Amino acid sequence: MDTLKQSGALVAALTVLTATLVWYLRLVSQSLTGPNNRNEVLTDEELKSRRNAWKGINMLNSIPNVATGEGYVVIGGSGMVGSAIVELLLLRKEKNIRIIDIMPPRSRELSQHPSVTFLKADITSSASLREALLAPFPSTGKPLSVVYLTAIIVRFWERALYCKDASWPVNVTGTRNVLDAVAQLPGEPILVYTSTGELSVEAPNHWSLSGPDHKQKVYSDDTVAKSYEQRRWYTKSKFAAEQLILEADKKSTRVRHGIIRPGYHIIGHRDLVVDPLLRMSTVPSIAGDWAHNCIVAWDAAAALLLMESALRERPNEVRGTTFLVTGKDQPWCYDKLRRTSKKAAGQPIKMVTLPPLTMLLIAHAVEALLYARFYVLQLLCAVGVVRKPSVSPSWIGQTLFLQPSTFNNFFEFKLDDARARNVLGYRPQWGNAECAFEVDERISREEVPLK
């Protein structure tokens, strides 16, 4: 009889435990499901009007349009935002532009332009950076006076401690090296830093017992502690870099520093969102019903040029501060962006919707597997059995991106860049559809197709 009672109690306990677990996982599933219509897409009429408009965008209307004649260096100038900065400087007829990067520009137009020079340098090496940064311009014999720092490593999927060194050397040590080198320049040089809008946005907790929260949150310039305390190493490294710049500005009486936070995703040619989407025949979709803002690289670059102008003309008003900037459109959900981009490019929309809870559980399993692999191999390396393990094994492929940190974007929010509009005069001209049109065209005429 006692045995039966014990068995009955065990069955009852397991039943309650199972029911609780099912209830909790259902709650988590609901918290991962957004409030927006996944099938929403711009109409043919809306796309037609925006297709006719995008080529008429004149970026001279977004930036100080008179050449300064200064010497410009764009660190990370071969990247998406850096290249846009260089093109805007050329648009207003600047003559002395230097790109410092580890890779040359992909665009033949930039690499062969008479006003643009390229110097290869690794910003994690202070000697390499100083040599490239402090050299005078051959055409004038004068040193540079404006530095745009856009070089970054974006590894949005990593949060484990062993992954820190994959982002920190470039994003933090590199920033420190740039600050040290710029401090050696004569006169009153200007440094404009490209940060991230993630530092203004709170990280969600999808495992919370509070259940789904579909209320749209609004974020502005203020730094949210949870953005860097609970997020990935990319965000933590950008916060650390910002702190270095703000501290340097407090100490310097000559160098003027300013920070722009573009957010949330920066989209454009060779980005991480629209560009790969237009190269896929079938598009996987996880939690595509969450909405937030995007900013096109052209508008992000324009904001950086506006910051440079403000640092020159009214430094006491803007130096040592951060400005959040975002795009022209109101928040779009992921699937609206995917469907509209495909439709704008005239491509069939083939989407595979993946269950978010299942994918989140798999993401944790992937993270655990990579964690165990790294430390086992590190132990074997210590005794001389294997070489030092890499953070990202080649055999895992794109599954590497499926880790819990990837889900940090899955909630409803809007960015408010009113301060940048009021103080800097920021006026974005590019929307998400205009970006899709341009990316599609640029892909079609790529000089060196991406592999």
Image: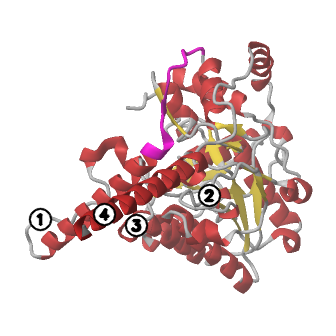
Residue type at numbered disc 1: Val
Q: Which of label 3 and label 2 is nearer to you? A: 3
Return the x and y of residue 88 as percentages of the image width and height: 72, 43
Query: What residue lies at 56% left-to-right and 38% top-to-bottom?
Result: 273
Q: Is residue 361 left or right of residue 208?
A: left
Residue assigned mark 1: 386
Query: What residue lies at 29% left-to-right and 67% top-to-bottom?
Result: 6
Q: Foreground residue, 210 or 52?
A: 210
Q: Which mark is residue 371?
A: 4
Residue type at numbered disc 2: Val
Q: Is residue 366 left or right of residue 89?
A: left
Residue assigned mark 2: 73
Outermost residue to the right: 422
Residue type at numbered disc 4: Tyr
Mark 1 or mark 4: whose residue is earlier in sequence: 4
Return the x and y of residue 372 as percentages of the image width and height: 25, 64
Mark 4 or mark 2: whose residue is earlier in sequence: 2
Residue at mark 3 to residue at mark 2: CA–CA distance:
34 Å
Residue at mark 2 to residue at mark 1: CA–CA distance:
42 Å
Residue at mark 3 to residue at mark 1: CA–CA distance:
22 Å
